[in-house]
Image (spheres, grey):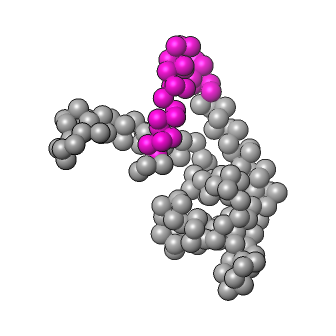
Amino acid sequence: MPEDNELSGEILELSGDIRVAVGRIARRMKQLYETGEVTFSETSVLSRLDREGPSAPTALAAAEHVRPQAMVAIVNALERRKLVERRADPTDGRKTVVSMTERGREELKDKGWAITQRMADVLHENLTPEEQRELRDVLPLLERLARLL
């Protein structure tokens, strides 16, 4: 990392290019969610619960980088569909913990599969095997960048 605080034009350009490309991918993925289905944000929360287990709504909000009020709305929508349930926190009964239901797991699997299949079709039909390898090779860097932001 450079010692001076000046960012080179090259790094700024790279940062802007990544922002634009990832933004386009995210928008296209969001468009794959049909009206009335579980939303992109709701799917993100289900994915987090699936990976990390039950969590307090405030911890979910922090992890998803949304306001607590927004997380309450997301959890309420998921609860109405019976995709998550709330229970008293075993260590502090004044708090609640959100966990995914079996129905939530099925919904996540189905939606995840549909989007993964669409992306696989695009990758297979439009990218060469070498380009596919290049994307695979850059994934750890993108994951690391996401964690650091």
Q: Residue 113, position in %: x, y?
A: 70, 38
Q: Is residue 81 above or below residue 123?
A: below
Query: Which residues, given as a range, are shown in magenta?
Result: 120-146
The residue drawn where x is 61% and y is 71% is 57
The residue drawn where x is 49% and y is 21% is 134
Q: Can residue 127 be seen in this view?
A: no
**Which residue is farthest front?**
3
Could you tell whether 124 is left or right of 80 in the image?
Answer: left
Q: Residue 131, position in %: x, y?
A: 50, 17
Q: Residue 68, position in %: x, y?
A: 52, 72
Could you tell whether 12 is left or right of 75 in the image?
Answer: left
Could you tell whether 65 is left or right of 73 in the image?
Answer: left
Q: How many labels does the image show?
A: 0
Could you say which is closer to the camera, residue 146 or residue 118?
146
Could you tell whether 81 is left or right of 4 in the image?
Answer: right
Q: Is the magenta stretch mostly helix, strand or loop?
A: helix
Q: In this view, does 12 lie above or below 68?
A: above
Tell me if residue 127 is in the magenta stretch: yes
The residue drawn where x is 69% and y is 72% is 97
Tell me if residue 143 is in the magenta stretch: yes
Name which quarter of the figure residue 22 lies in: top left
Could you say which is closer to the camera, residue 141 or residue 118?
141
Which quadrant is the N terminus positioned in? Answer: top left
The residue drawn where x is 53% and y is 59% is 64
Q: Can residue 139 be seen in this view?
A: yes
Q: In this view, does 64 lie above or below 113?
A: below
